[in-house]
Image: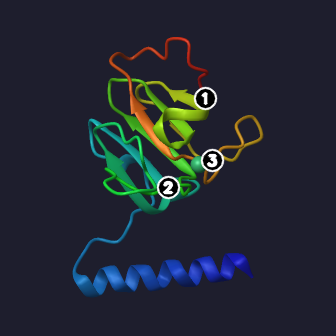
Amino acid sequence: MKRTRRMTALLAGCLAFTALGIQPATADWTDCPSNSLCLWDDTSYTDTRKDTTVSDSHMHLPPYIIGFNDKASSVRNNTQYAWVLFDDDTYEDRRYCLKPGLRIYHLGLDQWKFNDKVSSVLKLSTGSCGSYPVF
Ligand SMILES: [Ca+2]
C-alpha cells in the first residue's frame, strides 16, 4: 500500500515535471554531475535527486543549500573530496564519511541504519575521512 502510494506520487511527480518541460528525476548514479555530492530520495539512485558542490549545515531550514532533510536513501560522492553525512543539523549526531568516488545504494542497510536521516552534509578539505567513521 505504501509502495503503491509512493509509485503514484512518483508518477504524478514525473508528469508534473514533464508538464513544466523539466527533465524528470533519473534513476542512474551516472547522472550525478561531476564535482557534486548527489542524494536521492529512494534507494538505488532513484526518485528525486539533489546535488551540491558545497556543505549544507541546515538541510531542514532556509536558507539551506539543497534542503532535502531526512529524505536521502542513496548517495554518490562524485568529487575528489571526502564528505560527511550527519543525522542532525550543524554537523551533529551520528555521522558517516563517504570517500571520493564512492556511492551507497541503500543508506538503510543494517550496518548504517541511515535511511531518511541525513540533515547536514560537510565537504572535507581533502579526500581523507580522517577520524570520521566511514561507510
Ligand atoms: Ca536527521
Query: What distance separates the C-alpha of mark 1 from that of mark 3?
Result: 11 Å
- Compare residues 127 and 124 and report the one nearer the observer: 124
Q: Can the viewer see residue 123?
A: yes
Q: Residue at x 31, y 45 (%)?
A: 52
Query: What distance separates the C-alpha of mark 1 from that of mark 2?
Result: 19 Å
Q: Cβ(mark 2) to ligand 1 < 8 Å? A: yes
> Between disc 2 and disc 3, whose residue precedes?
2
Q: Residue at x 53, y 27 (%)?
A: 97
Would you say 35 lies left or right of 59 here? left
> Between disc 1 and disc 2, whose residue precedes?
2
Would you say 91 lies left or right of 105 here? left
Q: Amino acid at mark 3?
A: His
Instruction: Identify the secondary structure beneath mark 1.
Output: loop
Is disc 1 in contact with disc 2, using a CB cutoff of under 8 Å?
no
Q: Residue furthest left?
A: 21
Q: Cβ(mark 1) to ligand 1 < 8 Å? A: no
Residue 103 horizontal/vertical position (percent): 50, 37
Q: Amino acid at mark 1?
A: Phe
What label does residue 69 carry, if any? 2
Instruction: Identify the secondary structure beneath mark 2.
Output: loop
Residue 45 horizontal/vertical position (percent): 50, 54
Relative height, residue 17 to residue 79 (above, below): below
Residue 56 falls in image quadrant:
top left
Would you say 11 lies left or right of 125 here? right
- Compare residues 17 and 84 and report the one nearer the observer: 84
What label does residue 135 carry, if any? 1
> Between disc 1 and disc 3, whose residue precedes?
3
Give neighbour class at mark 3: few <14, some 14-19, many 20+ (Cα, 10 Å): many
Relative height, residue 103 to residue 9 (above, below): above
Q: Which residue is mark 3?
A: 106
